[in-house]
Image: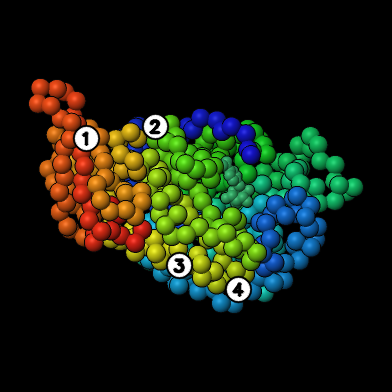
Amino acid sequence: GPQQEQPLQQQQKTNPEEIKEKMQWFADAKLGIFIHWGIYSVNGIDESWSFHNRKISHADYMAQIKGFTADKYDPQAWADLIAASGARYTVITTKHHDGVALWDTKLNDLSTAKATPAKRDVLTPFFDAIRQRGIKAGAYFSLIDWTSDDYPGFLKDSSRYQIKDDTARWERFRKFYQGQMAEVMNQFNPDLWWFDGDWEHSADEWEAQKVRKMLTTHNPNTIINGRLMGYGDYDTPEQNFPVQRPSFRWWELCMTINNNWGWQPQDTNWKTPYEVITIFADAIGNGGNMLLDIGPKADGTIPPEEENVLRELGKWNKKHETAIFGTLGGIPQGHFYGPTTLSKDSSTLYLFLPAKQSGEIMVKGLDNAIKEITVVGNGTKLKHKIVGKISWSPVPGIVYINVPETVLDTYMTVLE
Ligand code: JFZ
């Protein structure tokens, strides 16, 4: 994987209160939907990596451009599905490492607007539909562009290009990529920037600080992910479970529903709604967000398995929303064998039961703080019992909560 990231530094806003205010919607949002859509969705192969890893020639990879039709693309339906999932933000690929822009870039002809049968900017109607629903809209943007002749990374034809220490070429590329970024900035004013590919060059080579300054000057409230060589606002640990609580205050776990970011028909290794929900609970219990990825097909349809996960997750989110959105990460592990969250005023603790199991569940060391225990989204009050508490001892005892079968959720049951 990519190199160790440099420590995150926040530019522009330096006052911790201002930074906290800017980050508040992100901290409260908990769930985002990630979208990987591009010409790789035509054949259903690895996004950009398939030619980089020489599983397919660059020419054959690029030929997919003729198959990107978007003829069933319904951005309102996408936005409805995202809203139904309960997500408070979304992040869509504006350009992956293959260099194909999904908006109508003026800086070359390599776009869905100029080079595909879709013949249009597919991003504008999506950003509009998302914002109509009050959902924050983010732009994934690859710094790497393995198709640009000026990009000194992947060599499309190694006999033709010997790109080493060619500062003029790099200068041209830098102008080009920052120019495209400015187009995305001016057209969509993203609430969030999700950069990718920073590892191929240094912060100085990318001019990361200058880029950050450009984006935050245009929109002081925009949030930048942690893949801009240390110039981001939050951490993005790799898909890696179980979730560890990173040291950085704001973080986001990005995760696929099967094993790939883009649509790949042979990959049927779907996570179940229960699996996605338990990982989501784990992330928010550790104070993070989850950015859950879907990979639409080139015609614009979303695989039914992914739609199902989003809808089931959405039903569960709606039932348990007080325990999820706008909460804080919970108490340290050891008290309870499952994720927990806390209301902002810390007066309410939410327990996410890790298994679909009735009977007595155990919580260690919270007895004196309990007023009542209720099943979230159901209202049933539960009885509890304290064992091992001796009046003169500071040891708090163990709380047993009786959870009847009748209150169990299809997925995770939540108590408050
Ligand atoms: C990158 C891309 O290369 C990939 O194609 C996909 O778009 C994904 C979302 O992002 O892959 C990465 C890059 C960095 C990390 C994980 C996946 N990381 O640092 O955890």
Is residue 318 found left or right of 231 in the rendered image? left
Q: CA distance from mark 1 to mark 2?
A: 44 Å
Where is 271 relative to 23, above or below? below
Residue, x 23% and y 52% (percent of image)?
403
Q: How many residues crowd around disc 1 within 10 Å: few (fewer than 14), some, or many (20 or more)? A: some
Q: Quadrant of the N terminus?
A: top right
Mark 4, residue position: 299
Residue under numbered circle 3:
308
Q: Which mark is residue 398?
A: 1
Q: Nearer the viewer, mark 1 or mark 3?
A: 1
| Residue closer to the observer: 195 or 316 | 316
Compare marks 2 and 3 and give the one earlier in the sequence. 2
Is 98 placed left or right of 191 in the picture? right
Residue 171 or 368: which is nearer the viewer? 368
The residue mark sitting in front, 2 or 3, is 3
Q: CA distance from mark 2 to mark 3?
A: 42 Å
In the structure shown, which secondary structural element does the residue marked by tag 3 occupy? helix
Q: CA distance from mark 1 to mark 3?
A: 39 Å
* Mark 1 vs mark 2: in front: 1
Q: Please tell me whether mark 2 sits on a helix, a strand or a loop.
A: loop
Q: Is residue 40 visible?
A: yes
Q: Is residue 175 above or below residue 138?
A: above
Marks 4, 2: nearer the viewer: 4
Q: What kind of colouring is applied to the model shown?
A: rainbow
Q: Earlier in the sequence, mark 1 or mark 4?
A: 4
The residue beneath circle 2 is 14
Q: Residue 19 at x, y = what percent? A: 36, 37
| Separation of marks 1 and 4 at Cα, in angstroms | 56 Å
